[in-house]
Image (cartoon, rainbow, N blue to C red):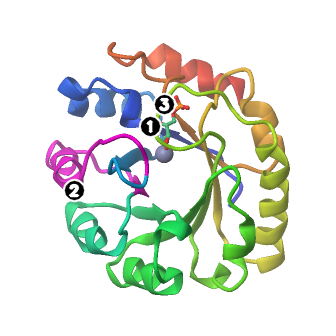
């Protein structure tokens, strides 16, 4: 599973025209839609929930939707997102009371699983659950906002995570989220990432998404 996926983060899209914005980036070639869920509790911002995910499905979006939960508590929202059409559901292990149980809940809901690590969160949470994972997401900014700068020490963490994935022998996607731009995406790929969240690099803040901007990110890879 080495092919690269680009995952536009709709956090930077124009929410008043969200359906159109998502269709535009998918038509431009995006592989998966990154859907940031923030609760003003686990992170200092408030965004969107299952109703919006369901609305995208009703709008005709068939691409995988990668739901990044930045919420606490985690478990009670998972069945709602599964019903709303989520494909992947990822969560921050320190926001869950019982990491194994939350992973199992996602699987039992019919979705693919993932753990998310903030820049300074150690990888130890991976120790016992690799066989329950479909994705590992490394945050390269502190979560809560788009448009922040990539934190360089996460490159080492990417290399270590890639090593752990290879040692597991499993097909686990390695996603990176935060500050991915045309000028660093190649270095990030070389460190082991195969799935690239890009918000502000693809969607102009408050402006219509521009397929050329998407192409620029892909060409840089
Ligand atoms: C931040 C979110 C990111 C954000 C990335 O907490 O998880 O997905 O949208 O935005 P950029 O690509 O602008 O750093
Ligand atoms: Zn995200």
Residue range highlighted in magenta: 43-70
Do callouts 3 and 2 mark residues in contact (Cβ within 8 Å)? Answer: no
Q: Would the CB of label 3 be found within 8 Å of ligand 1?
A: yes
Q: Quadrant of the C terminus?
A: top right
Spatial CA distance of label 3 from label 2 is 20 Å
Determine the image quadrant of residue 45: top left
Query: Is residue 89 rendered to the left or right of residue 188?
Result: left
Please check the rendered image and state whether residue 64 is part of the magenta-colored stretch, yes or no: yes
Mark in front: 3 vs 2: 3
Q: Would the CB of label 2 be found within 8 Å of ligand 2?
A: no
**Closer to us: 97 or 153:** 97
Query: Is residue 195 rendered to the left or right of residue 155?
Result: left
Spatial CA distance of label 1 from label 2 is 16 Å
Q: Is residue 114 visible?
A: no
Q: Read off the residue under disc 3.
A: 146
Do callouts 3 and 1 mark residues in contact (Cβ within 8 Å)? Answer: yes
């Amino acid at each position: 599973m080495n092919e690269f996926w680009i995952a536009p983060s709709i956090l930077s899209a124009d929410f008043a025209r969200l359906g159109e914005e998502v269709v535009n980036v998918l038509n431009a070639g995006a592989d998966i839609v990154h859907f940031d869920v923030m609760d003003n509790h686990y992170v200092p911002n408030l965004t969107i929930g299952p109703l919006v995910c369901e609305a995208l499905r009703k709008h005709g979006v068939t691409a995988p939707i990668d739901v990044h939960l930045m919420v606490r508590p985690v478990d009670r929202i998972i069945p709602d997102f599964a019903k709303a059409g989520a494909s992947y559901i990822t969560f921050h292990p320190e926001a869950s009371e019982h990491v194994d149980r939350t992973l199992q809940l996602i699987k039992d809901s019919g979705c693919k699983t993932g753990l998310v690590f903030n820049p300074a969160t150690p990888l130890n949470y991976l120790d016992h659950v690799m066989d329950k994972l479909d994705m590992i997401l490394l945050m390269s900014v502190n979560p809560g906002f788009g448009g922040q700068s990539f934190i360089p020490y996460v490159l080492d963490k990417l290399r270590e995570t890639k090593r752990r994935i290879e040692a597991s022998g499993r097909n686990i996607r390695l996603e990176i989220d935060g500050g991915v731009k045309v000028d660093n995406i190649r270095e990030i790929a070389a460190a082991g990432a195969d799935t690239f969240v890009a918000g502000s690099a693809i969607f102009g803040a408050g402006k219509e998404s521009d397929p050329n901007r998407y192409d620029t990110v892909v060409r840089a890879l």
